[in-house]
Image (cartoon, rainbow, N blue to C red):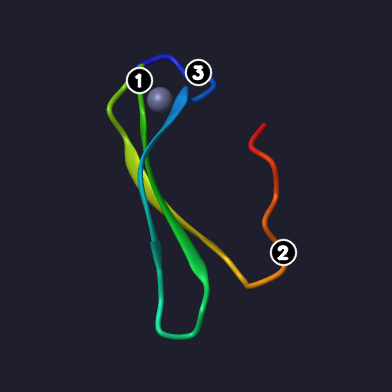
Amino acid sequence: MGAHVHVRLIQSLGVTEDGELIEYSSCAECGATWVKKYPEGQVQAPD
Ligand SMILES: [Zn+2]
């Protein structure tokens, strides 16, 4: 497998009981999936 820059596709968004934003994403190239949390007030723009 060659390394590549993941092409992140946001699948869905959720919010935890603590008010954190959760972003469920997957890669359009390899299908890898991951979850990213954004503490409240620290939402960052995607790359
Ligand atoms: Zn990938």
Residue 16 percent coordinates (x, y): 41, 76
Q: Which comes before the other along the chain, label 3 or label 1?
A: 3
- Between residues 25 and 5, which one lies in front from this camera angle? 25
Label pair 1/2, CB-CB below 8 angstroms? no
Q: Estimate the x, y position of residue 8 in percent, counting from the top left.
A: 46, 30
The three-letter amino acid code for the residue at tag 2 is Gln
Left or right: where does residue 40 sit relative to residue 20?
right
What residue is pinned by disc 2?
42
The residue depicted at 54 percent of the width and 22 percent of the height is 5
The residue tagged with tag 2: helix, strand or loop?
loop
Establish whether ligand 1 lies closer than 8 Å to the Cβ of label 3: yes
| Mark 1 residue's CB less than 8 Å from ligand 1 | yes
In the image, ligand 1 is in what quadrant?
top left
- Disc 2 + disc 3, Cβ < 8 Å: no
SS at circle 1: loop
Residue that mark 1 sits on: 28
Closer to the camera, 45 or 34?
Answer: 45
Q: Which of the labelled discs sits on residue 4, or is there none?
A: 3
In the image: residue 20, left or right of residue 24:
right
